[in-house]
Amino acid sequence: MNIPQSSFPRVIIIGGGFGGISLAKKLCKKEVQVVLIDKHNYHTFQPLLYQVSTGGLEPDSIAYPIRKVLQGYPNFYFRLTEVKRIDTDKKMLQTNIGEIEYDYLVVATGSETNFFGNKNIETLGMAMKSIPQSLNLRSLILENFEQALLTDDLHERDALMNFVIVGGGPTGVELAGALAEIKKGILPKDYPDLDTRRAQINLIQGSDRILPAMSEIASSKAERFLEGLGVNVWKNIRVTDYNGKHVATNTETSFESETLVWAAGVKAACIEGLNAKELLCRGGRLRVNEFHQVEGFKEIFAIGDVAQMETEAFPEGHPMMAQPAMQQGENLGENLVRIVENKPLKPFVYKDKGSMATVGRNKAVVDLPKFKFQGVFAWFVWMFVHLYFLIGFRNRVVVFINWVYNYIRFDREARLIIRPFKKIKAK
C-alpha cells in the first residue's frame, strides 16, 4: 500500500462512515499513524439518500471526499480499496491492493440491507443504502412513468405507477412521503397526458405501527400525515415474495407493482476473519465490551452499526444510527490515546439525543429525551439538525438552497435519468 513505517503505532480504520470519520478526526493530531480504508473515496450522508432517490437533491450534495475531510493532518493516510479478510494471527489485512499490518484495528464497516434470505426480493427489489442504489431507484421511478405513457394495457400501466415500500422505519416513511408529494405536485405537470391519479404509494409494515423505535404519538401522527398525503399504510403484513410484478404477502392482500423498495431491515457488514459464530450477535453484529473491544481481542475494536455493545439500557446493542456511531468514534479515539499512554480506559456511555423523521412538506415528528412534538416546528428542527451534521460548508449551502427552492416552487429539479437503469427480469 506504499505507507511508510513510523515510530508511532498504526491504527487502521475500515470504513469512512459516521463512526470512522469521527474516530479519524479524533486521532489525526495525536501521536499515532492513522490509515483509513474504504471502497469509496467519499463519505455518504445516508439520512438524505431518499431525497436523491426522489429527485430532491443531487448526489454530490450529500457526499464529501474523505481526503478533504482529513487533509492537512499529519500521519494520516487514505487508501481506496476493499478489505477481503482480516488475519488476526498475523495482525494483517488482505485487500484488493495488497496487505497491510496493523497495531490496532477498528472495524467501522456499517450495515447493509438485510433481505432475510429472500433471493427473489434481493434480485428484483430495490435497496437504498448507497448513492449508486439511490440513483438506480431514481432512474427506475422516472423510467416507469415514461413507460406508462407508451402502454395501452391498463394493468401494466397501473403496475408501472404503483410503488410498494417495505418497512415502516424512518427510511420507508420518508421515502413514502416524498413519493406522495411528487405524485401530488410534480407528476400532473410533467405528465399531463397520463392519469397520474392512478399512481399508488403503498407502505407495508410488519408490526402494528410505523416508526416502531419512536414514541406511539410520533407513530400515530406520522401515519396520519402519510394518509393525508394519500399513502396507503398497511400494518401487520409481511411481504413474502416478489417476482418483479407481483408482491405476495402472508395474507390474502397482494400488490401489482413494477417497483418494490426494500427498507425492512439491515444487517452488519462483517468481514471474513471476524465472522466466527462466537463473535457475532443477532444481525451479524460483532460483540464488543464497554471499551469497544471485540470479544477475545485487545487490539481489535468495532464501532457503529457493525458493533453490538450490550448494556442494561440497551440489551440488544445501541440503535443502528449516526449518533451512536459518532459518539462511539469519539470515545474510542480517547481510549486509543489512553492505550498508547498506558492510561486506564474510559467506558462508553451513550447519550440519547432523540430521534426524528420527516413525512413531507411542513410535516415531521421529533422525539427528544424530554420533549415530543410534531408538525411544522418539528419539520424545521429536522431540517436544522440534518444541515448541521452534513459535512462541508458547500454541501450545507447547496442542500439549504435546494430545500428553499423546492419549498417555494413545490418542485424537484433533479428528476433526471442520468444513467438508465434496467431492472433484472424475472426468470
Image (spheres, helix red, strand yellow):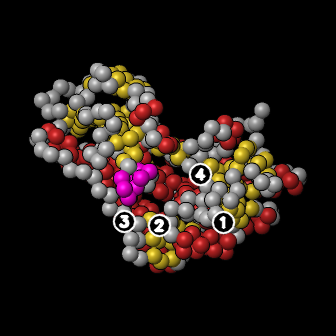
| Image disc number at residue 180 | 1
* Residue 261 in view: yes
**Mark 2 residue type:** Met
Q: Residues within 10 Å of mark 3 (few under 14, many from 20)?
A: few
At 63% from the left and 74% from the top, the residue drawn is: 224
Task: Mark 1 or mark 3: name the one nearer the start of the chain.
Answer: 1
**Mark 3 residue type:** Lys
Instruction: Say what secondary structure mark 4 lies in.
Output: loop
Relative depth, front residue between 292 and 160? 292
**Mark 1 residue type:** Ala
Q: What's the CA distance linking mark 4 and mark 2?
A: 17 Å
Q: Which residue is mark 4?
A: 263
At 79% from the left and 64% from the top, the residue drawn is: 198
Task: Mark 4 or mark 2: name the one nearer the start of the chain.
Answer: 4
Instruction: Say what secondary structure mark 3 lies in.
Output: loop
Place of residue 336 in the rendered image (x, y in percent of width and height, measured from the top left): 20, 42
Q: What's the CA distance linking mark 4 and mark 1?
A: 17 Å
Residue 87 horizontal side relative to residue 229, left or right: left
Quarter of the image for the C terminus: give it. Answer: top right
- Dot in front, 4 or 1: 4
Q: Are marks 1 and 2 in contact (CB under 8 Å)?
A: no
Task: Mark 1 or mark 2: name the one nearer the start of the chain.
Answer: 1
Magenta residues (range) = 311-318
**Mark 4 residue type:** Ala
Q: Residues within 10 Å of mark 2 (few under 14, many from 20)?
A: many
Q: Which residue is mark 2?
A: 356
Q: What's the CA distance linking mark 1 and mark 2?
A: 19 Å
Relative depth, front residue between 414 and 5? 5
Residue 413 occupies which quadrant of the picture?
bottom right
Instruction: Say what secondary structure mark 2 lies in.
Output: strand
Q: Which residue is mark 3?
A: 353
